[in-house]
Image (cartoon, rainbow, N blue to C red):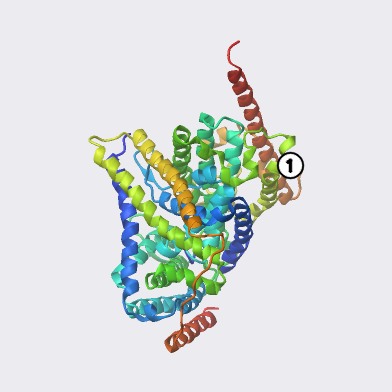
């Protein structure tokens, strides 16, 4: 996922540097306020740790091995702000010294892995861990899921950045100037590897580090470096700590507003064609073109036709039938989907809290 | 299914040793008396960085190829062994880039140039052009950046970043990070090696995974402990939070000449690559 030089257009690189700078500035100011003179040694040594952690070979189920970025582990222990700084420094050294990732694309790589990765990991960990005890196994699972989600969101962003290149940057003959694949190829190509190998490596490292620290030094899990917000990490998400979660909600809202960017994608995702597309001559040509020019069967596949009618989505194509503007449909779908996920975690948090309260009271 | 424990531990050990070896190689090259080694680090950054950006910016293949030739010439004049470049840069970039750009050969629509014998897939002219373009651009940018890094001691690169207005605190943090990377690499190496020396059989995948993640946890604990120790050591020497970077560089006529030469190449490449 370390995008090398030459894959992204200079304007994309400049935009992503521009997006990353305010995060770096805010993170630095925030961590400096908390650490004061301890800032330099801590960031230096923790960045070195992130760098070394990226070299660990993690054995995965199935006999393969993978490398982790360490975004989940770093965020859980250091907090999101220190984590995004440490990972950015580690990525800078990787790019400069080992040529792993480009210099012009450093802003993009830091944005994907260090900044968004840390924020996603923090959000998932906070929602997953809730107010459970530091030694709770729920925290291990929350950390593992945080690492898995973070690396996959980062990979998705990298795929989108690569995938929009052929849409905007072509030479006079129409050949792509930078990364050659559009979104419908870049996204599956990137996500398959990350949903499996890289995601699992991150899953095990994040969960494993938290499990180890629970056994040996659980005080490190208090996220002392992420500031005031984490002092209240053991409190439930409720109206009273709105200020505490406000930044997370603002970021979520921003992401929802950005969802119509998907409309830029040309064509449809490979392997996500509807049954009707098999009988549409124009679509049949497009499908064959992106499938190695292998001719499609004359009739639509019977099994596909049968099973596709099992479930009718309420918002097909991310646009409810009553919405005319596709962009608005995307925002609505994002709101609905996020609402469902948040409700699920609130409900899960409430159930876990009830169970733990019951256990802590003990038998009469 | 079990994972070969020997393989996993040794692969991690080999990653740590590779990183250390890479540093020793770089230090040896930085000590040679070549073109880039003679230049002021600030001049090197101001000369090479625009070439990297223009390699990414240019819209003409022949300009990318010309810049690649310049990168090789600079490497040769700076006594960087081409074998090192081939192994550490060209092969690595080709593997990664080829993996991504390879399918573009067949999937980009256009005039077919050649058909694979058994599969029948056709290599198209625009596909070939897109793939060569991407590979050459990535190779050129990576060659420039690695030659720059190999010919300059790390501490000098960091200090020279000040000309790009990098804050002093960032320069100090990067310098310290670099130093502690070696300490932590050594620590991780020792942990894996000591574990390996105590093992008589093979661990199953699950135990091996537990061992690897626990090692990461140990390293994390040691890191935070170490940062506290370093902080106390700095405080005991009077550290109050302010940082200073000594700018002891001096330029001479060769620096200005090379800056003018590289600047001209960058301008020409920019002009012809529009």
Q: Which quadrant is the C terminus of chain A positioned in?
A: top right
Q: Is residue B199 left or right of residue A262?
A: left
Q: Chain of mark 1?
A: A
Q: Is residue B197 visible?
A: yes
Residue A265, image x, y percentages: 61, 55
Q: Nearer the viewer, residue A216 or B12?
A: A216
Element on which disc 1 rests:
loop
| Residue A105 in the image, given as x and y percentages of width and height | 52, 63
Q: Residue at x 37, y 61 (%)?
A: B92
Q: Is residue A347 above or below residue B183?
A: above
Q: Please give the count of numbered marks on the rendered protein.
A: 1
- Residue at (45% x, 70% y) in the render: B157
The residue positioned 59% from the left and 46% from the top of the image is A226
Q: Which residue is mark 1?
A: A321
Query: Quadrant location of residue A292?
Result: bottom left
User: Which is more toward the observer, A16 or A353?
Assistant: A353
Residue drawn 65% across and 33% down? A235
Q: Is residue B142 left or right of residue A328?
A: left
From the viewer's side, name the closer residue of B93 and A186.
B93
Residue B139 horizontal/vertical position (percent): 41, 68
Q: Residues within 10 Å of mark 1 (few under 14, many from 20)?
A: few
């Amino acid at each position: 996922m370390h995008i090398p030089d030459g894959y992204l257009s200079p304007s994309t690189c400049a935009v992503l540097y521009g997006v990353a700078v305010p995060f770096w500035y805010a993170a630095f100011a925030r961590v400096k306020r908390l650490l004061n003179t301890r800032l330099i040694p801590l960031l230096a040594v923790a960045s070195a740790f992130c760098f070394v952690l990226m070299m660990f070979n993690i054995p995965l189920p199935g006999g393969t091995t993978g490398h982790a970025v360490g975004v989940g582990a770093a965020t859980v222990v250091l907090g999101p702000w220190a984590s995004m700084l440490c990972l950015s420094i580690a990525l800078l050294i990787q790019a400069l010294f080992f040529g792993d990732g480009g210099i012009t694309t450093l802003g993009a790589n830091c944005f994907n892995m260090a900044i968004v990765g840390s924020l996603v990991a923090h959000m998932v960990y906070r929602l997953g861990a809730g107010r459970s005890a530091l030694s709770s196994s729920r925290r291990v699972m929350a950390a593992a899921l945080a690492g898995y989600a973070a690396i996959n969101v980062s990979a998705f962003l990298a795929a989108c950045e690569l995938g929009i290149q052929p849409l905007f940057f072509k030479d006079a003959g129409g050949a792509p100037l930078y990364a050659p694949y559009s979104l419908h190829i870049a996204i599956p190509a990137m996500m398959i590897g990350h949903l499996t190998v890289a995601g699992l490596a991150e899953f095990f490292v994040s969960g494993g580090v938290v499990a180890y620290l629970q056994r040996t030094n659980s005080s490190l899990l208090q996220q002392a470096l992420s500031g005031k917000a984490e002092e209240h990490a053991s409190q439930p998400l409720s109206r009273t700590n709105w200020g505490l979660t406000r930044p997370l909600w603002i970021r979520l809202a921003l992401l929802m507003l950005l969802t119509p960017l998907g409309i830029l994608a040309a064509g449809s995702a490979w392997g996500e064609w509807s049954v009707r597309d098999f009988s549409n001559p124009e679509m049949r040509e497009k499908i064959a073109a992106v499938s190695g020019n292998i001719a499609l069967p004359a009739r639509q596949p019977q099994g596909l036709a049968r099973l596709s009618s099992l479930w009718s989505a309420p918002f097909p194509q991310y646009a409810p039938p009553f919405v005319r503007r596709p962009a608005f449909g995307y925002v609505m779908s994002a709101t609905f989907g996020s609402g469902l996920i948040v409700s699920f975690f609130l409900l899960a948090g409430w159930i876990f809290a009830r169970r733990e309260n019951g256990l802590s009271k003990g038998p009469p | 299914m079990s994972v070969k424990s020997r393989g996993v531990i040794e692969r991690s050990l080999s990653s740590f040793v590779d990183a250390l070896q890479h540093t020793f190689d770089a230090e040896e090259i930085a000590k040679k008396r070549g073109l880039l080694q003679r230049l002021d680090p600030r001049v090197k950054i101001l000369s090479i960085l625009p070439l990297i950006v223009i390699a990414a910016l240019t819209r003409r293949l022949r300009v990318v190829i010309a810049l690649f030739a310049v990168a090789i010439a600079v490497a040769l004049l700076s006594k960087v062994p081409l074998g090192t470049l081939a192994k550490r840069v060209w092969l690595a970039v080709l593997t990664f880039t080829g993996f991504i750009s390879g399918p573009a050969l067949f999937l980009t629509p256009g005039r077919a140039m050649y058909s694979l014998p058994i599969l029948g897939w056709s290599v198209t002219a625009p596909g070939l052009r897109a793939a060569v373009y991407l590979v050459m651009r990535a190779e050129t940018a990576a060659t420039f950046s690695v030659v720059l890094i190999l010919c300059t001691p790390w501490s000098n690169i960091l200090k020279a970043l000040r000309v790009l207005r990098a804050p002093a605190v960032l320069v100090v943090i990067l310098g310290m990070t670099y130093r502690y990377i070696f300490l932590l690499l050594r620590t991780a190496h020792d942990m894996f090696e000591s574990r390996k020396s105590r093992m008589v059989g093979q661990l199953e995948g699950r135990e091996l995974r537990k061992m690897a993640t626990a090692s990461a946890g140990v390293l994390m604990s040691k890191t935070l402990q170490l940062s506290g120790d370093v902080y106390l050591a700095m405080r005991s020497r009077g550290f109050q939070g302010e940082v200073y970077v000594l700018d002891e560089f001096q330029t001479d006529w060769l620096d200005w000449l090379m800056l003018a030469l590289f600047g001209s190449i960058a301008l020409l490449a920019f002009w012809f690559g529009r």
